[in-house]
Amino acid sequence: MSQHEASLPGKARLAGIAANGWKPLFLRWLTLPTAAVSALLIGAAIIAVMGANPLTGYHALLTGAFGGSYALTSTAVKAVPLLLVGIGICISFRANVLNIGGEGQIVMGGLAGAATALALPNLPKIVLIPLVLLAGCVGGGIWGAIPGIFKAYRNVNEVLSTIMLNLVAVQLMNYLLAGPMIDKSESFAVVGRIPQTRLLSPNSWLPIIVPGTQLHLGVVIAVLVAVAVYVLLRRTGVGFRIRSVGLSTDASRYAGMAVKRTTAMALTLSGAMCGMAGAMLVFGSISHRMVTDGTLSGFTGSDGYYGIVVALFGGLNPLWTILSAFLFGGLLVGGVSMGIALNVPYSSDLVTTIVGLVVCFVVALDAVRRRANLQSGPASLRQLLTRNWRAPADSGPRAAPVPAIQPAIEAAVPLPPPPVPELTPADPGEALP
Amino acid sequence: MNHFFTVAVLSATVASGIALGCPLLLAALGETVGQRSGVLNLGVDGIMLLSAFGAYFVALRTGNIALGVLVALGVGAVMGLITAFINVTVRAEQGISGIGIYIAALGLSGMLFERYVGTPLPITNTRGPFFAVDIPLLDRIPYVGTMFFKQNVLVYLAILLILALTFVLRHTTYGMKVQAAGENPAAADTVGLDVSRIRYSAVIFGCTMAGLAGAALLIVDGIFQENLTQGAGFIAVALVYFGGWRPGGVAIGALLYGLTGAVILTWKTLGIIPLSLSDLAATAPAVIVVLALLFLVGRYRQPTALSKPYLRGVS
């Protein structure tokens, strides 16, 4: 910690010393919960204004999300695509690339997976399931590679191109599901066929791991992917280059890294994660078909946007994103129960509103935290976006091995050197001795 | 194809292309000013939705479209105040706060609609200046009259705004201030300009325009539904990049987008595009914009301080 602070300007250090005891603690640990609680309070006010009882609503939300095994498994299933998109966002945001195209990448992943299952229905389970998930990655990866290559080699702003590709993806889905990939066995010539695939081969279904629930293998796979990406970002050369390019393209270029290739690859990987989420949506669904109602959110459930929230709430760390995805999955699942309990038609919109408010509060409180100029505190969003996490082969003194899961903040800021004796490790909030 | 190349069909297509591009143009012009001052607002789509709902609700209850448009402007301005507070005063990360505002407004507009309207009813009063104004004499010019001078009043306003904003940004003190805030806020601060105030005004103007765009979209559709915009606000943001942060360029982009959409619609009606391929053809505007960007980028530089919050002494 001392090494870290030695680089601070004296003024900031004084500010750190002068800070009240509770303030760094609050800024370090309670920013995200405060954001969530504030959003929920405003949500409660909105419910009250609409003429319903917020307490009834939130009780139903909690019960529906986390009360009992059925609720918990539903939440876990809902969290799968959120987690995968969140992991993808972690990768791209670490490279300082804003991937707003999760929606389109989910759709392309779903389409690629469904097409594979339609083409090769007779493969055994053990081959077909990995194959369709891989196809999802490839589909989403291509949809991420296009803006990635455009950004890297033609300097096309990725926000723009990913948004445009979302629009292209939804129309492609509508075309394919109403045309080449439609269920031809249905012949309601009068009203027209539903734009959906036929029942996909049972060999491609994600197996249920807890009988009697919807909990499918995808939950396990998504968590494993999160761990893998954590290792990738933190312990491999590829991950180091991604983070380095996110920190400074110039410095990375001087260091001899292939900056353009890395940028393109970060967005490709990010798209691949979203694509796998799309495949999970198809093969973990109850209907085991891919259906479109003509809109993006009809298939994705807006997971491409919610995934951004999930990743930010998880501090852009894949492991914390697991917890974050579970919480947001609970919010979305519980929202349905809330709607039933309150007997109102607008519950899903209410949940959408609350999620949006959470984003606004997280991003605003993060800025407040940043301005508090507490360099010993947690990394701010901009810091998260642009720097930190040490190199895998660091020449400096090595910290103790990192436990698999550690507090978000510890994971998010550069690892301090081994604890200095005079510092009490149990008191992380104390800015300086 | 022969049916398409008749003068009547062509001029009608151009007219509907202009009408389709109008909401995009209004929103994109507002976003241009905001971005020139250094603030990226990705919440345009949400603000359009909320304003469109406001306009719809008032128009439905009072039967007065003009009142609805005023309400849309008000909703846009209030959202602008909130956006500016989050981005300028609190200095939040702009790419993400915009998404937050979009999601919140998307939910809120849907919720208000479900709670206070429920069953979608079309706006009954479809006459007046917001539907079609024939400019006297000019509308009699053969073909050109049909294309340009039988539009609604918002189209004329948008065309005036292209010229007005070009002038304001290039030739007025305020325009210079906006550019200073967007290019080098520290220098602007040094010479005594209030960067925050400039950015506030630019963002509020931009969001008010987004509100107007929401009303324009509502008038085109004549009815509100959940997620009415279908991402139009995001397209507007994209058009700002496309147009190189200049009102004229943005207008060309909006026209290109609207015309491509209108041509596709006409071809669909004429049967030139078979029904089975109509979804595929609907990707054309987005594909064309992306391709155009591929060959246009590098010619224009984005405002240096775009999406960078300004804090005195730190930059």
Image (spheres, grey):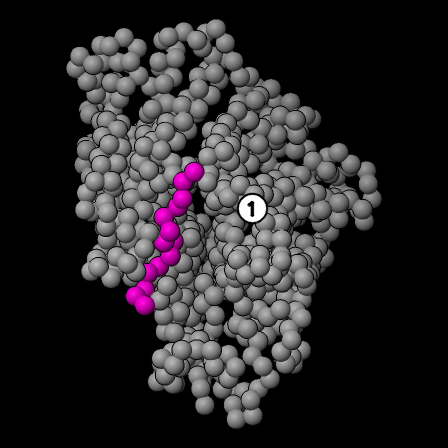
Subunit ID for the residue under disc 1: A
* Position of residue B117 in the picture relative to residue B197 (left or right): right
Pick the front one: A350 or A127: A127
Q: Compared with residue A5, is residue B121 higher up or lower down, i.e. above or below?
A: above
Q: Is residue A326 magenta?
A: no
Amino acid type indicated by mark 1? Ala
Which residue is pictured at 23% across the width and 45% down the height?
A: B175
Magenta-colored span? B299-313
Q: Which residue is mark 1?
A: A152
- Kindly identify the residue that appears in the image at 44 percent across and 83 percent down: A431
Residue A129, horizontal then vertical, whole percent:
75, 47
| Element type where label 1 sits in the image | helix
Label 1 Cα neighbours within 10 Å, binned few <14 / some 14-19 / many ≥20? many
Q: In this rendering, would B40 be left or right of B283?
A: left
Q: Position of residue A321 (x, y in %)?
A: 56, 62
Q: Residue at x 28, y 19 (%)?
A: B148
Residue closest to the eye, B233 or B206: B206
Q: What is the x, y in percent for residue B105?
A: 36, 48
